[in-house]
Amino acid sequence: MKRQKRTTIYDIAQKLNIAASSVSRALSNSSKVNAATRALVLKTAAEMNYQQNAMASNLRKGNNPTIGVVVPRINQNFFSNIIAGLEEVTYKKGYNLIICQSNELHAREVDCVNALINQHVSCIIISIAAETGSHQHLQQVLDRHIRLIQFDRVVNELDTFKVINDNERASFEAVMHLVAQGYQRIALLEGPQDIDIFRQRKEGYLTALRKSGFPILEELMCENAWTKELGAKATAELLNLPEPPDAIFASTSDFSALGVLEVATDKGIAVPESLGICGYSNEPFTEITSPSITTIDQYSISMGKTIANLYFQEMEAFDFGVEPKIVSIKPRLIVRKSTTRLLNS
Amino acid sequence: MKRQKRTTIYDIAQKLNIAASSVSRALSNSSKVNAATRALVLKTAAEMNYQQNAMASNLRKGNNPTIGVVVPRINQNFFSNIIAGLEEVTYKKGYNLIICQSNELHAREVDCVNALINQHVSCIIISIAAETGSHQHLQQVLDRHIRLIQFDRVVNELDTFKVINDNERASFEAVMHLVAQGYQRIALLEGPQDIDIFRQRKEGYLTALRKSGFPILEELMCENAWTKELGAKATAELLNLPEPPDAIFASTSDFSALGVLEVATDKGIAVPESLGICGYSNEPFTEITSPSITTIDQYSISMGKTIANLYFQEMEAFDFGVEPKIVSIKPRLIVRKSTTRLLNS
DNA sequence: AATAATCGGGCAATCGATTGCATAATAAAA
DNA sequence: TTTTATTATGCAATCGATTGCCCGATTATT
């Protein structure tokens, strides 16, 4: 069983005894071809099972209607929703999506970006890995005049389009909500502070405390409590303090909040009565735990759509040198049982 | 700011006053080029910021190291895990992944497949949409000698590589487990029976009942209880029967099982004492509900890896006409609290 | 010293589609 | 009927990299 060649426009041209250029024009609906000829070509193409070779076409046209996406992990709720949202829009525009995951590794991220540059994609959409490194690879993208959109975890120094959540604001509101619920000693589980979003979330926390006239206590802020396990560990330590907190804001993730909840449940601490818990991300499970967990929804699917639309509306048709726009999406606080101990809210 | 041309091998050739072919050979590590020349080319290429144009290279070489993936929904735990697993392997091989989602729509699936054919991908990996239609688009893939791997939801009639879960076996074991726990009237929430996997799960259920000497009762089998809402609705009806079931196997999904659990909780029915609940898929949340839900893990990430490895080991290098292999993965029953009422298990 | 083998490198065709330019055929205008 | 527009089509270059083939120069073999 030998691999037989696919039919090309030359095959069609030969069969119809016309020039390949006419076939090309007929297939691309050019006005420079007679209606009858076009019909004939279309019919023959269908009969011969013709399918365009996108590689040849794109090479000649010098553009590749493909968008590359680099995310830390594909199978993480937030990112898979982003991708789903992107796909929804790009599909309609006839664009393809090439997906890569950095696995939070800088070296791998660089690899992925280079592969996408090779592919001559029209745009690269990226949320950077936790492992930090230089931004040289992203600068390369800009140098090559490939459009670049950063989202969520962004490198601020780079002058690119950005779509971000207003983490500070969301975080601020979450803490203000805790305050309104009468919590007095509010602890913070932080993410790596070299990543922007985590710094912003901390900032929101601090602002809310200041605004509420609460002291800022170092012992209530735990670094690097990212995962469920680390969240649990930090919680155990917090609850062992002479003056333990009466609320914990797991600003890193809902997984971390889940760790908090499990430790509290184990220790027989009543949630929300004796301990308020707030997470971040609105993972599906937060609705299901008992009590359900207050959290922050990032509108991930719609954020994906926003990113894609940004490309099509602001970048695709325009030349370079357009002033990069920064779109900030305000996340929404979802109040659930884990922080509701007053009725008036 | 004009878009300047990217550097090509011709630019390098010109600068070094050698032929483009030599540059190409140097870059591809061909033995037909002097070590000194190669070093010079490599150095110059780096200086000039050269990046290969994959479109041109692939066109010439007549192959595109890219794999297309079509799934019903990207942001569904099972599928995003599959994709993550695929990516893990393909990345190491230097392959790209183009991802499309059919949104469970047949027409859209056809569209996606055609786009992938245009791209001349090396392989298409697909799990078909719920909305049924002809398989003509998949036949087209085979006709064009593009490798095709179906997974999870497969069209049996097509003679292709397949990677599936042994749904019948898993379902059988789940029901046998319920029997062992002393449940007597076991209900089934079914998925659309025109999809293979759901038919197989029902088959496993029936076999287990027969083997256990239980009657098969039509009133305990609910069609199309796919989502949480439908699962809840079916449960409400089941529990209103003169002789309600004492266990419900939500063979469609964990979401459906969640619906069951919520209804049971609302009605004050004790789980697992008065009602056993078993789901399917091992969604992360099943571990977190109270009680935690017994379910079936499909090893989705490793399944993704398996699929990719299948391509690289059995298909990439080989000519067509290789006998398609069917890989069946045995899912694992995860027993949790929602079905554990005896200690001896 | 003469011949063969090896090496390094250049030329030009090729992958398949697109497109500017030229030209033939037809229609419209004078 | 002659001239001018218009339309349809063909020719050939092009996108950027790869590769078969050829050839000159160097090295190895007798």
Image (cartoon, coloured by chain):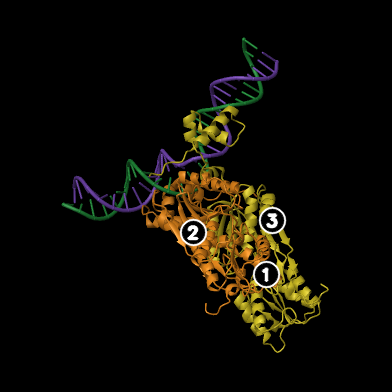
Chain colours: A yellow, B orange, C purple, D green
Q: Amino acid at mark 3?
A: Thr
- Report helix, strand or loop for mark 2: strand
Determine if residue A253 is in view: no
| Image location of residue A337, percent across then percent down | 74, 73
In three-dimensional space, the C-alpha distance between marks 2 and 1, rounded to whole angstroms, equals 33 Å
**What is the number of the mark on residue B264?**
1
Q: Is residue B275 above or below residue A41?
A: below
- Left/right of residue A137 with respect to residue C29 in the rendered view: left
- Report helix, strand or loop for mark 3: helix
In three-dimensional space, the C-alpha distance between marks 2 and 3, rounded to whole angstroms, equals 36 Å
| Image location of residue A281, percent across then percent down | 68, 67
Q: Are marks 2 and 3 in contact (CB under 8 Å)?
A: no
* Upstream in sequence: badge 2 or badge 1: 2
Label 3 sits on residue:
A306
- The quadrant in which residue A78 appears is bottom right
Pair 2/3: label in front: 2
| Image location of residue D10, percent across then percent down | 51, 28
Determine if residue B342 is in view: yes
Q: Amino acid at mark 2?
A: Ile
Q: What chain does mark 1 sit on? A: B
- Left/right of residue B109 with respect to residue B160 in the rendered view: right
Q: Is residue B108 above or below residue A204?
A: above
Label 2 sits on residue:
B164
Q: Are marks 2 and 1 in contact (CB under 8 Å)?
A: no
In three-dimensional space, the C-alpha distance between marks 3 and 1, rounded to whole angstroms, equals 40 Å
Can you say which quadrant of the picture contains the C terminus of chain A?
bottom right
Pair 2/1: label in front: 1
- Report helix, strand or loop for mark 1: helix
